[in-house]
Amino acid sequence: MNTFEAFGRCIDRCESFIERRFAVALLFSEEFSWGSSDSGAHVAIDQLGIVLWQQREIEGHRVDFAFTHAKGNERLIIEVDGHQFHDGSPARAEADRARDRATLAAGWSTV
């Protein structure tokens, strides 16, 4: 898969406008090199050994973006949902809290 195809796959996997904005900002950074995997598009920051996963399942929950480090336990989840997504949906907000508790128990931090 070439860089253009990988970029298109990443944008296609975004579920909202704000996810596309976040992905584009990251992916146009000069630090990133492209790749893909069976579980979805990812972008590696080669110099630091950091890998960005998009729409990855973690502890039974789908997360927007997840950063992992190739040489250690550092794991960070980035959720980019805004008020519009959660307004009027206490069930959605509770599902997000349940996701955050499950992933935290497994060693992930969420922003």
Image (cartoon, rainbow, N blue to C red):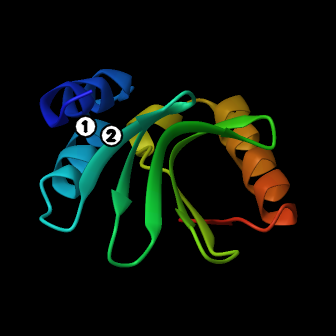
Please provide percent x and percent y for residue 17.
25, 32
72 sits left or right of 86 in the view: right
In front: 98, or 78?
78
Q: In the rendering, which numbered label is found on residue 20? A: 1
Is residue 87 something one can see in this rendering? no
Which residue shows up at 45% across the image and 72% down it? Answer: 49
Residue 4's image quarter? top left
- Which residue corresponds to mark 2? 19
For marks 1 and 2, give the CA distance: 4 Å
Residue 11 drawn above or below residue 26? above
The secondary structure type at the circle numbered 2 is helix
Q: Amino acid at mark 1?
A: Arg
Which residue shows up at 24% across the image and 60% down it? Answer: 32
User: For the N terminus, which image quadrant?
Assistant: top left
Among all residues in the image, which is located at the extreme front?
Answer: 1
Residue 71's image quarter? bottom right
Q: Are marks 1 and 2 in contact (CB under 8 Å)?
A: yes
Which residue shows up at 12% across the image and 53% down it? Answer: 28
31 sits left or right of 66 in the view: left
47 sits left or right of 56 in the view: left
Q: Residues within 10 Å of mark 2 (few under 14, many from 20)?
A: some
In front: 110, or 83?
110
In front: 24, or 94?
24
Residue 90 drawn above or below residue 76? above
Q: In the rendering, which numbered label is found on residue 34? A: none
Q: Amino acid at mark 2?
A: Glu
Is residue 106 something one can see in this rendering? yes
Please provide percent x and percent y for residue 53.
48, 47
The secondary structure type at the circle numbered 1 is helix
Residue 9 drawn above or below residue 27? above
